[in-house]
Image: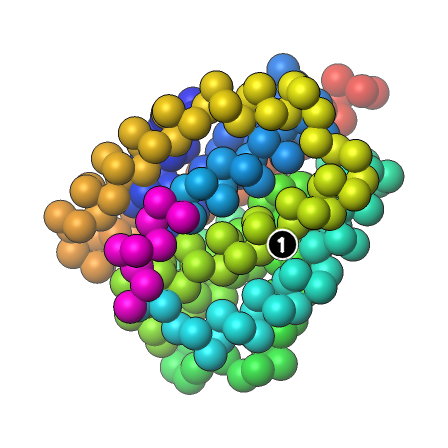
């Protein structure tokens, strides 16, 4: 599953953490998986950064990442103290609905304001710390903007890298980095590198229209998988 998730990450610029967390959460606790995914996402971002540097929309990234970094510790607090099930269900509904809207061809005709950018960063930071999947608000933000897909993908990757690097100290502060988390990250690293390489090559050979449709389908699949995993966890505990 890690290899498949890495292919999706290399192709679309997102999806690795969410897909891996969903699949592994059937057998491992989130407090073990999330710190490992932070480390792997940092490795993935560093690996992709040289190829996307020139396409990053820095003005939006600075505001978004700044607010996300500020609110990531709030999300880490939720991870340590609050059940994740209800938040995952709401997140899944938001992702699926938005993907359907984008699939219908509805997008913003203007660039987002700074307030909208900051609100997106705040939401992403909280979700990133709480669930290790702060990407959906950022993905929705850039897919719905008038930016070209290449610039949006580059900006998504850069935002994820900055947020994950900022989240590592918070995870350490809450004592969530364990021997099991480190072991999981090390075991998964080869599959991550190989999958990202393959996914990046696939993305470079397809048109923007095709890539956008594939990305939206992946988003919808991620939403369904998130809801299913959350309902499974609730039924198991109930």
The residue positioned farthest toward the right in the image shown: 81
Quarter occupied by residue 84: top right
Q: Which residue is located at x 83 percent, y 20 percent?
A: 238
Q: In screen coordinates, is 192 left or right of 84? A: left
Residue 49 location in percent, x, y?
Answer: 35, 54
Q: Which residue is located at x 54 percent, y 83 percent?
A: 113
Quarter occupied by residue 154: bottom left
Q: In screen coordinates, is 49 left or right of 94? A: left
In the rendered image of this protein, does residue 100 appear above or below residue 227? below
In the rendered image of this protein, does residue 85 appear above or below residue 128? above
Q: Magenta stretch containing residue 168, yes or no?
A: no
The residue positioned farthest toward the left in the image shown: 205
Q: Which residue is located at x 49 percent, y 44 percent?
A: 42
Which portion, as a residue range, is magenta?
Answer: 46-54
Residue 2 location in percent, x, y?
Answer: 43, 26
Residue 94 location in percent, x, y?
Answer: 59, 54
In the rendered image of this protein, does residue 171 appear above or below residue 119? above
Answer whether residue 220 is visible to the viewer in this image.
no
Answer whether residue 170 is visible to the viewer in this image.
yes
Q: Nearer the viewer, residue 92 or 158?
A: 158
**Image quadrant in which the N terminus is located:** top left
Would you call the spot at circle 1 few (<14 residues within 10 Å), some (14-19), or many (20 or more)? Answer: many
Q: Which residue is located at x 65 percent, y 19 percent?
A: 180
Residue 229 location in percent, x, y?
Answer: 62, 28
Q: In screen coordinates, is 58 left or right of 38? A: left
Q: How many marks?
A: 1
Tell me the SS state at disc 1: helix
Q: Magenta residues: mostly which secondary structure?
A: helix
Which of the colour schemes (rainbow, by chain, secondary structure, one colour) is used?
A: rainbow
Q: Which residue is mark 1?
A: 166
Q: In screen coordinates, is 48 left or right of 38? A: left
């Amino acid at each position: 599953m890690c290899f498949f998730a890495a292919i999706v990450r290399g192709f679309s610029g997102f999806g690795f953490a969410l897909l891996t967390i969903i699949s592994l959460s059937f057998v491992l606790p989130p407090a073990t998986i999330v710190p490992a995914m932070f480390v792997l996402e940092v490795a993935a971002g560093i690996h992709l950064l040289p190829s996307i540097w020139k396409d990053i929309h820095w003005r939006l990234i600075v505001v978004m990442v700044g607010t996300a970094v500020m609110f990531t510790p709030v999300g880490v607090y939720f991870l340590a103290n609050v059940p994740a099930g209800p938040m995952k269900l709401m997140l899944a509904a938001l992702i699926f609905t938005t993907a359907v809207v984008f699939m219908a061809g509805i997008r913003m005709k203007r660039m987002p304001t700074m307030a909208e950018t900051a609100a997106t960063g705040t939401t992403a930071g909280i979700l990133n710390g709480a669930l290790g999947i702060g990407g959906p608000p950022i993905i929705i933000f850039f897919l719905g903007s008038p930016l070209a897909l290449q610039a949006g993908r580059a900006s998504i990757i850069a935002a994820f890298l900055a947020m994950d690097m900022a989240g590592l100290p918070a995870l350490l502060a809450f004592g969530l980095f364990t021997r099991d988390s480190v072991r999981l990250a090390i075991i998964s690293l080869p599959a991550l590198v190989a999958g990202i390489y393959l996914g990046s090559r696939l993305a470079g050979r397809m048109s923007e229209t095709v890539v956008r449709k594939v990305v939206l389908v992946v988003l919808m699949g991620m939403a369904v998988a998130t809801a299913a995993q959350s309902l499974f966890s609730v039924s198991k505990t109930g």
